[in-house]
Image: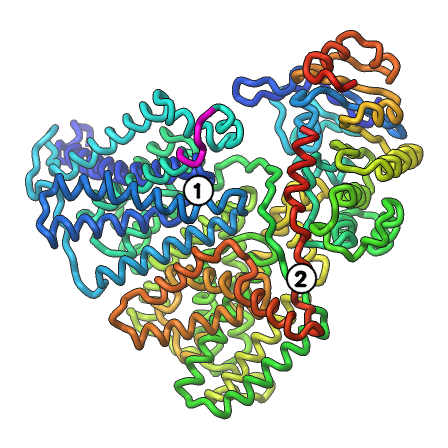
Amino acid sequence: MHGEPDEDVVTQFLQYTVLGIVTGAVYAIAATGLVVTYSTSGIFNIAHGAIGMVMAFLYWELRINHHWPAPIALFIVVFVAAPLLGAVIERTLMRRLRGASVAQSLVVTVGLLVLLLGVGEAIWKPTVARELAPFFDPKKFKLLGVFVSWHDAITILVGIAVAIFLYIFLARTRIGIAMRAVVDDRNLLSLNGAQPDRVSMLSWAIGSSLAAIAGILLAPKLQLNHIVLTLLVVNAYAAAMVGRLRSLPMTYVGGLILGLAESYYIGYIHLTGSWWIGLRPSLPTIMLFVVLLLLPESRLRAARLAGAVSPRVPSRRMSLTGAVILVGVAAIVSQFLGSGDLIRVGQGLAFALIMLSLVPLTGYGGQVSLCQMTFAGLGAFAMAKLGVNGSIVGLVVAAGLAAAVGAVIALPALRLQGLYLALSTMAFAALMDYMFFTNQHVFGNFGTLPVARLKFLGLHFTGEKSYFVLLAIAFAGLSMLVMWVRRGPFGRRLSAMRDSQVACATIGMSLARTKLVVFMLSAAMAGLAGALYGGLKGSAGPIDFQMFQSLPILLLAVLGGITTASGALIGGLAFAFLGVLQAHVASIGGLTFLLTGLGAVSIGRNPNGLSFMFSQRLRRLFPRFSAETVALPEPGFDEEVERVAASAG
Amino acid sequence: MPLLQVDQVGVRFGGLLALQDVDLSADEGEITGLIGPNGAGKTTLFNVITGLQEPTGGHVAFDAAELQKEKPHERARRGIARTFQRLEVFGSLTTRENIMVAAEIRSGWSKEKVDARAVTDEVLDTVGLERQADQRVDTMPTGLARLVELGRALATAPRLLLLDEASSGLTSTETDFMAGLLRRLSAAGLAVLLVEHDIEFVMSLCTKIHVLDFGKLIAVGTPKEIQKNKAVQAAYLGSEGDAA
């Protein structure tokens, strides 16, 4: 006990340290890419990992499938394809987001993620296994008694090279300095003769190259897998958070901490038991939450959002009429549909219910959640465990459990800007995928749990028809609740918060509390919806509620129109329809992702979505029924404000 | 002791000193002016007082209480209200809702009983926006939107009102209305701190004027004293020849 430490122990420690530094270097490269684009364009690129994923697959295509020499394939991917993709993304999507809200730019970047995932799955089918060997495999050398593979050595060297390159580029070159200035003041920069658009495009090109490098270095270590590589973004932003999404050196530190933590965890912590299996992949999420707790409160900034028009809230009578019509139509339709179709359309209603949970949160309050499916999963779990025989207790617990969990996730991010809340929810969804839904004690060993259908007040909703009508009733009822909230004091508060957080604070509103309440409300609704969804399917399993299901939920809710209940209905039915379509066109993998992603990036800036367009049409046809439409702001209001502001200085 | 006491406040943005050792005070029942050329630091000082900007040095005291640690909404609850140079209205809400939100928030935390509807009606009457009560604010011209912001501030029942460029974008009729309104409010005991470009407007309303230039306080005094002050003349002539 008192002698020199065993040499093997030292060597082993060094071995894990080297492996940790290697992983850390990849995370650092990915994370700096995020920071470079975020700090120069002000847009947080959730699709960063997806870009790395597509580029890693492209590299595989050239290197393995077409037998190109590695240097040429690398050059084409890292220095040609990736920067080109980044530049195209900036030119076609991100430039239009100038002055957009956090919610709008999140929707577009999530749309991009989903689109790239769809593209990746369409070109490289997930059903085929692909291998990407490490560089110079299996060559390794010995350093200080530790074996280091060439691939690992290259990874560390690339990490160092990227750091040196970025330092010289940002501190010493004219365009690099302009890059740092662009976010501070675009107009000032253009006055000084630099071109902000070009600077922004360059930053996206560089960011995209860094994502490609990270993807190519990581794929042989992990897996050449669409989802795994796309999720790299969560590790990357957990690391970038250490640098508060701004500081590159601290981002490197964050990457290293994460890499080392993972490596030491693998090396030294041998927790057995199913609950611990998911802990390692959850480390980034855990680190993210710890960092969030330590971050200082965000300064409120006066933000001028590019005019988002929200539809007028329907009156009590209008919403009651709509609710009655919906239930009536559902009752009639249920008589004519076969049981397969009842389930398919019923799924649409269930998805619509989950999307409805985003209306108060995102539509009214301007906050974004990327984990509504996770809440739905918690709801289904609660219903399965406590709603045996369809007891209403299951439904109540479903809502309560989701709300309670929602509060816990939201709390660390509440003091911060909306972006941090969204990132927390995505990290949380990933954590739940690893630690909860796939846990054998939750749904059984990759099996499913039976979920009962509701029995309430002597009414049994066990048949397909009656359950279909129940879903319509639930949607109608919750829609009325949401609209009632919107018409009342809390709804006014939410709209106020979306329009101007600064003004809210200066009239005495606690933004954190308002955000917490609406987040809990939204989580509770999603939990309830999940319990009903489980009942529809009759079971709940680990793959029903994955994080990647939450993304289309948000996107389709936005496409349908996230400010209205009718938008959620359109979105929900569209999601169910896409599922059916995918089943028919199985040859195109990722079709749902492709279409939702494409839709989101094309109209993601318009928060009113399709339902708004329909209601505008209807309004022209039937001017009497125009309650849910809105008076468009006089053109030029923003210009007027700008003019006045300019004249005032 | 004045209601608002700003003591040696400094703000630094990187290498730029936006405010340097600024002293300022505002009293109940009086309209105090804060003027200065563009970029002098007027809005920054408002941000410090309302807690939107953390100062690098100095103190802000309100009603003899140190505000250092308080968040913006806590300061608002003490009775500090403000408007913004660049409008920060709730564009998707109507005029009535803009004002009602403020009244409802107060009824949420205040120990006194606040009838939000009654307060809203009263404020609508005070700012003269009854006819526009049910109009969405993002469809209204700037002048009226400024009145909405003022109304919203008043609905918090403030003791100190910070107005950032209250008259900019207003027609001359609206400016006269605003001037009359501010006189009535201060006569009722409100402390008003006014940042203004319209020098005539300031001179006619204020009892005391502070002048900022490049982040430093260069003069304090009555309108007459300020008009004669050599440093003030130099500052204005140096930066924008047509002002003052």
Q: Which residue is mark 2?
A: A630
Q: Does the stretch in magenta take in A360?
A: no
Asked which secondary structure carries label 2, the reply is: loop
* Res. A290 mark: 1
Instruction: Give the residue displayed 49% in from the left and 88% down from the top.
Output: A465
Compared across the picture, whether B169 is left or right of B203 comes to left
Q: Chain of mark 2?
A: A
Q: Residues within 10 Å of mark 1 (few under 14, many from 20)?
A: some
Q: Check residue A647 in the rendering and tell me which mark sits there, or answer none.
A: none
Q: How is the image coloured?
A: rainbow
Q: Determine the image quadrant of residue A80.
A: top left
Q: Which residues are magenta?
A: A193-198
Q: Tell me the residue at 78%/7% (across/down).
A: B230
Task: Please say if the residues under marks 1 and 2 sit with CB atoms less than 8 Å apart.
Answer: no
Position of residue A448 measured from the top left corner of the image (x, y, whole percent): 34, 74
Instruction: Report in which chain the residue with disc 1 lies.
Output: A
